Amino acid sequence: MIYLRRFSLPTEGDEINFLARSFENKRTCYTSRYPFGIFLNREVPALELETVTILCGGNGSGKTTALNLMGEKLGLRRGTVFNRSSFFGDYLKLCQAETAPAFRDARESSRVITSDDVFDYLLDLRCMNENIDNRRRELLAEYAGARYAKFQMRSMEDVDRLRQVADAQRRTGSRYVRDRVMNDVVEKSNGESAFAFFTKEIQEGGLYLLDEPENSLSPMLQGELKAFLEDSARFYRCQFVISTHSPFLLAMKGAKIYNLDSIPVQPCRWTELEHVRVYWKFFQDHEEEFKDGAPPF
């Protein structure tokens, strides 16, 4: 499913004319002009988007900026804030987005997901788990005090204490604690929790702009995320625009890849990307070490 069909950045003439007018008004003397200049002289065409479109390029290539512009132009929900100058709104007005009629119904499900969103989620989980650990210790102490208490009920005010003692005496310590704390908070690695975040946030029938989703994920989990995104696009009417360096995600079935390092910017095969070929050469150079019987170090 395609919700965002085309996205255009300002032309070179638009940028130059705007900056010239701003210079006359002395706006450029005191503030950053970002994102003006990021794509200047890069010959970026109108981006024709597919069900899965990937923006790839080195640091400073503008792939995250492009995602932020798309998200703001479409008014998509996002969790964390991003860097923007006083010129961001002016630049955004010069951008053009063409959506399909189906986007109207998909807007509510659509959102921008960045690595900062994932990190914030992991921090929230860590805080929650720390609080639960503290509560577990408190309950274990409570259990020990109740299980071995010599208690005799003297009035109706002692009913709650009687129940506590009886409960402790017929349960093990782990069962006593488990029944009183959250059962659905599972101890997971950061990578497992990050993967779970994507499966929770990505719903059926939405446009999702993902900024470097591979952060925090092991190679194996990157492969699982690739499969999850492919299934979401194929079976659940999702569209993805992804900024990534991950060879696993770059190899997604049917993905259209724009190499933002090339001039002009144009689509390419994932195997043509320079950093992917660096990986390939690295493993070629170490091919003998992968053969059976080769020492591990």
Image (cartoon, rainbow, N blue to C red):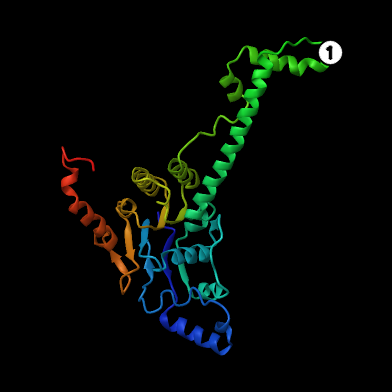
| The quadrant where residue 55 appears | bottom left
Q: Residue furthest front?
A: 297
Residue highlighted by disc 1: 155
Q: Position of residue 288 (x, y in %)?
A: 15, 46
Nearer to us in this view, 44 or 281: 281
Q: Residue furthest bottom?
A: 24
- Disc 1 is placed on an element classified as loop
- Label 1: how many residues lie within 10 Å, few (<14), some (14-19) or many (20+)? few
| Quadrant occupied by the C terminus | top left
Tell me which residue sits at (34%, 54%) in the image: 246
Q: Position of residue 132 (x, y in %)?
A: 60, 34
| Quadrant occupied by the N terminus | bottom left
Q: Residue furthest right?
A: 155
| The quadrant where residue 128 appears | top right
Q: Position of residue 123 (x, y in %)?
A: 55, 46
* Above/below status of 214 relative to 273: above
Q: Position of residue 150 (x, y in %)?
A: 73, 10
Tell me which residue sits at (35%, 57%) in the image: 245
Amino acid under label 1?
A: Ser
* Above/below status of 36 relative to 110: below
Residue 50 visible, this orientation: no
**How many numbered badges does the structure rendering display?**
1
Tell me which residue sits at (17%, 48%) in the image: 287
